[in-house]
Image: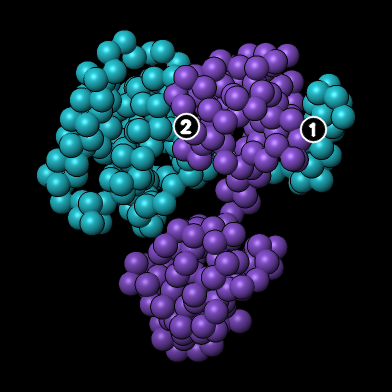
Chain colours: A cyan, B purple
Amino acid sequence: MSYEEHVNKLLEEIRREREQEPNVRSEPRRFENSKDLLTFLRKLPVIRSIETTTLPSFLRRFREGLNITVEDASNAFGLDAAELVNLESTGFLPWTVLPRTIAPVLSAYRIHIEAITFLTLNSFEIARVSKRISDLDEARQLVSTWLADVRAEFEKETEVDLLA
Amino acid sequence: MFGAFINSDEFIASLHAGVITAFELLWIEGARNVIPFLRSAGFADPEDIWQDCWVKLFRTNCRGYDRSEGEFPEWLLTVAKNRGRDRERKKKRSRTGSIEDIPEQLFAVTDENGSGDHNRVALLDEVLGRLDPDDREIIRLGCELGLKSPEMALRFGSSRVAIRKRKSRLLRKLKRQILRLEDNELRRTRQQTTGRDSP
């Protein structure tokens, strides 16, 4: 089978698979206020094992998977909507944001520090391969310090479950 | 089209050996070929999907690729297609509800009937207590440990489809039971306040 034939075969497979799936429309999850949203998130299990992706991508898909709007989430975390969108954008480098800004999001989503480390290192590898890092050693040091600071934020908030 | 080098034995061997320059070339080739393919297939966020694919290939040194099963570029597109479809399915599952949503869904049912926190916990305890051990284990694995159907299937020694069906049935059963219990609770409350049975 030629390359073009293989591409067409895959496109046809995708079309057929989508046809067989029901169309699902859903309304965003509604919360009375930010406190309710945070209480809802607090009930979620701690995320330790995680799919192979980057931190911003995970944050966006996690929120979307729960049908929570950017506005509701940003209000609950004390961020501007634009700030949250930035944290969730594909090319964002997590270690360039202050740990105290992102820590409330990570703890609200119940992401264990080991999972955060894994996702951040994936972001680092993407930044490296896409030549967005000029000084590799300096960037490694930054990532390491940033992760330690996120851990310190969790400790300050006594997020024992996310550190154990 | 992919560069001819990408299908060479030398390049594949470099990927299997984890040579970073090989992965840098893979990144560039993917951006040129995989992203347009994903876009033409109508996937949302093709850049994001390719990024995830690359990370996965990097972490595994492309060990999933077996030369005897076909050419590398075709395999790469298949990996990207599967990743994209997997995301689409997950998104749909999250909209239709899943076992991970059970506590929230149960509370949502009680909220509509205006029960207080104390009643909710009592109801939840009662409903969970009535389940058979396998169903309780499914809830524990899904809610406490965050396991998905494939991982649960391994633990139970059954197929993914069987687990998904069981989870779906379990969710319906839980909703029915909690509604029934709430009806009983409401009836009891009315009896106590009015001194007679409600219609």
Q: Which residue is mark 2?
A: B18
Q: Which residue is mark 1?
A: A10
Give, as a three-letter code, the residue at label 2: Gly
Instruction: Find numbered disc 1 in the image and state the secondary structure of the residue it sits on.
Output: helix
**C-alpha span from label 1 to label 2:** 28 Å
Q: Nearer the viewer, residue B171 or A56?
A: A56
Residue A78 place in picture, x, y as percent? 27, 31
Image quarter where the N terminus of chain B lies is top right
Can you say whether A155 is above or below B40 in the image?
Answer: below
Q: Is residue A96 left or right of residue A87?
A: left
Residue occupying image coordinates x 47% and y 37%: B59
Q: Is residue A129 left or right of residue A114?
A: right
User: How many marks overall?
Assistant: 2
Can you say whether B25 is above or below B73 in the image?
Answer: above
Residue occupying image coordinates x 57% and y 31%: B13
**Mark number, residue B28:** none
